[in-house]
Amino acid sequence: MSEAKRKAEIAEAEIFARPWVFIRGVPTMKFLPPEGPPEVAFAGRSNVGKSSLINAVVGQKGLARTSNTPGRTQELNFFVPDGYSGAAGDEPPMALVDMPGYGYAEAPKGEVDKWTRLVFDYLKGRVTLKRVYLLIDARHGIKKNDEEAMNLLDRAAVSYQLVLTKTDKIKPPAAAKLAEETAAKIAKRPAAYPILLSTSSEKGEGVSELRQAILQAVAG
């Protein structure tokens, strides 16, 4: 094993093997926690599997709430690894943010507009935000509202990386074709990170690769 890989595995174990805790739900910008450790955020259409993937990343089944009801996550939910006092010199190394899902047509328009303003005000104004992981359901590929989200991320100059979810729900040849098509679609987008990730929360596939991507983004 190379020294770089050994260090990466140690860092992954130190951060993601310990318990994580929910620290705050943010319904409006005035409730944002003070800027502290670097943050990575998870975004995507309603029911794309954000909460399930966050739970898989931290190895805890019930940290982020999962639901079959689209639009349940209506706040920015912040999570950090447990065991840090928060005092100077003992701050968490990073925070994860579960963002409200977009594209839920049955929600009242006023609520959709409110969620959208909250999400993108946070994206544009958060200095400690290092990367957004934009989740795409492998069964459906990139939809119009995903493209709209990428347009906003590009305009805000926020680094984002696409993550295919639920890849166990499609056959390997279809998954390979989707990955190739998706990579081509983001190739010319200015804020898109060029490497596409593929995951299955249910099977645990691609989770370690996502953890390493998160650690690299935070370190950068």
Image (cartoon, rainbow, N blue to C red):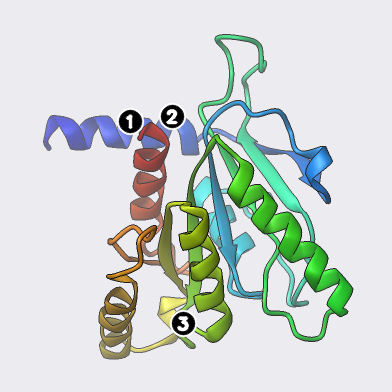
Work out whether residue 4 or residue 143 is closer to the camera in this orientation and state it.
143
Split into 4 quadrants, where in the image is the N terminus?
top left
Residue linked to disc 1: 10
Residue 28: x and y in percent read 82, 49
Left or right, residue 59 beside residue 216: right
Q: Is residue 130 visible?
A: yes
Residue at 82% x, 64% y: name it: 114
Residue linked to disc 2: 14
Name the quadrant containing residue 203. Answer: bottom left
Residue at 50% x, 69% y: name it: 151
Name the quadrant containing residue 181. Answer: bottom left
Work out whether residue 212 or residue 105 is closer to the camera in this orientation and state it.
105
Residue 163: x and y in percent read 42, 66
Q: Earlier in the sequence, mark 3 or mark 1?
A: 1
Q: Amino acid at mark 2?
A: Glu
Left or right, residue 53 beside residue 161: right
- Crowding at mark 3 (Cα within 10 Å: few <14, some 14-19, many 20+): some
Badge 1 vs badge 2, beta-carbon distance below 8 Å: yes
Residue lying at the far front in this picture: please name it. 155
**Secondary element at tag 3:** loop
| For discs 3 and 1, the disc positioned in front in the rendered view | 3
Residue lying at the far left in this picture: please name it. 2
Residue 138: x and y in percent read 44, 81
